[in-house]
Image (spheres, rainbow, N blue to C red):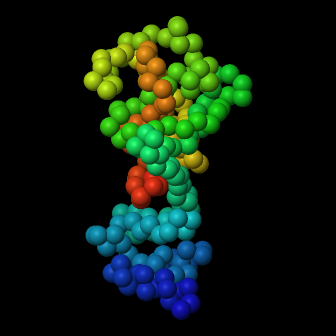
Amino acid sequence: MCLDRMVDAFADWLGLEPDPNPPVRSWEATSRLNRARPSAAHPEYRLAPGYPRVQYAQDGYQPQIYNMEAEAVAYGYFDPQYDTYRVPVTLPAFVEPHKFETVMKYDSCASAVYLGHADARRMGLPLGKLTYAIPFKNAGRDLRASQFDLPVMKIGQIKLEEVRVLVPQLDIGMSFLGQSALRKLNSVEQQGDQIIFRR
């Protein structure tokens, strides 16, 4: 089946109606999908990552075509020693080389990203000079932490911006990947020994 027929079949599946006056000035008019009127159920059509997205204005149904960014995917792996997933991340640092790679424990119950003291030192944070004013609980203990926002961090190749981070006054060991980062993702999927992050 040629590409045009595949696109037309997809348009039929969406229940699109051909525009009686399709634009003819550019390549976006070459397939029926791009000159179709939107239905109430499909005001916007998303194709596979890397393909154009078709979005219609309310007046005249004129399409606006622009490229979608490919979906970013990252992976973690299950570690039976900790009974949770370990996730490779890249964090910024205030000292040379201004970034470093580490591994965090996945914790969907944690409200934020929690840094262990080893990662905090690699980041260049002066632990003895931080203000530990944020109360939180860990393993039934009442603890306090210092709080700040990271301008950027990465889970694999997924870039996240403005991520809330807590540095506990009492060292918690390995860092935790919590909701301040996880809620910026499109999805988190656990598949056996692997965890998949998408954005």
Q: Is residue 55 above or below residue 163?
A: below
- The x, y position of residue 177, in whole percent, is 45, 37
Foreground residue among 2 and 139:
139
Q: Could one spot residue 196 in this view of the protein?
A: no
Q: Residue at x 40, y 63 (%)?
A: 57
Q: Residue sitting at 55 percent across and 68 percent down?
A: 51
Which residue is nearer to you in this view: 20 or 96?
96
147 relative to 90 in the view: left or right:
left
Residue 33 locus on image (x, y percent):
46, 78
Outermost bottom residue? 1
Among all residues in the image, which is located at the extreme front? 81
Residue 121: x %, y % from top left: 59, 20
Residue lying farthest to the top in this orientation: 129
Above/below status of 166 relative to 144: below
User: Tag count in the figure?
Assistant: 0
Vertically, is 192 above or below 37? above
**Residue 156: percent from the left, percent from the top?**
57, 47
The reply to whether residue 14 is in sight is yes
Above or below 113: residue 191: below
Rendered residue at 72%/28% (across/down): 97
- Identity of the residue drawn at 51% across and 44% down: 87
